[in-house]
Amino acid sequence: MRTPGRSGLDICSRRERVEQRNRVMIARYYYWTELKRRRFDDVLKILADREFFIDERTVSNAILDNTELFNRLLDEGADSKSLRRDYPGFDWD
């Protein structure tokens, strides 16, 4: 019998998983647009096709729904180090 892996954060419902995915996606959107200075259309492709494997429309909707988080990252001037700390598991360099 397999036992599920345990982490410090247990996400149970589909809604919670989608919300967590979208928070990470916004952090990645911030990273690509603000730190790496990539164009919006290029970032949509990266997030949709290479990082999250979802439709570009889903990425756009997540951006629209999470402008507060994006604006907070802008206001804080988040850098790669703080993004790595808050959202481990991605390459932030």
Image (cartoon, rainbow, N blue to C red):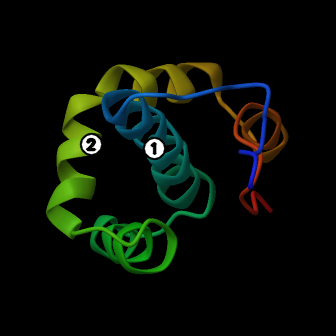
Res 2 quadrant in image: bottom right
Q: Is residue 62 above or below residue 93?
A: above
Query: Residue at 27% across / 42% down in the picture?
Result: 62
| Residue 38, image x, y percentages | 47, 69
Q: Is residue 5 above or below residue 67?
A: below
Amino acid on which disc 1 is placed: Arg
CB contact under 8 Å: marks 1 and 2: yes
Image-based side of 17 in relation to 8, left or right: left
Residue at the spot of label 2: 62
Which residue is at the front of the view, 87 or 82? 87
Other-residue count near label 2 (Cα within 10 Å), few / some / many at <14 / 14–19 / ≥20 = some
Query: Residue at 77% across / 45% down in the picture?
Result: 5
| Residue 91, image x, y percentages | 76, 63
| Residue 79, image x, y percentages | 74, 40
Amino acid on which disc 2 is placed: Ala
Q: Which mark is residue 53?
A: none
Total label count?
2
Which corner quadrant holds the N terminus?
bottom right
Image-based side of 26 in relation to 36, left or right: left
Query: Residue at 65% across / 29% down in the picture?
Result: 77
Which residue is at the front of the view, 2 or 71? 2
Q: Is residue 54 above or below residue 80?
A: below
Disc 1 versus disc 2: nearer the observer: 1
Residue at the spot of label 1: 21
Image-based side of 92 in relation to 49, left or right: right
| Residue 72, image x, y percentages | 50, 19
Residue placed farthest to the front in the image? 1
Query: Residue at 76% across / 46% down in the picture?
Result: 3
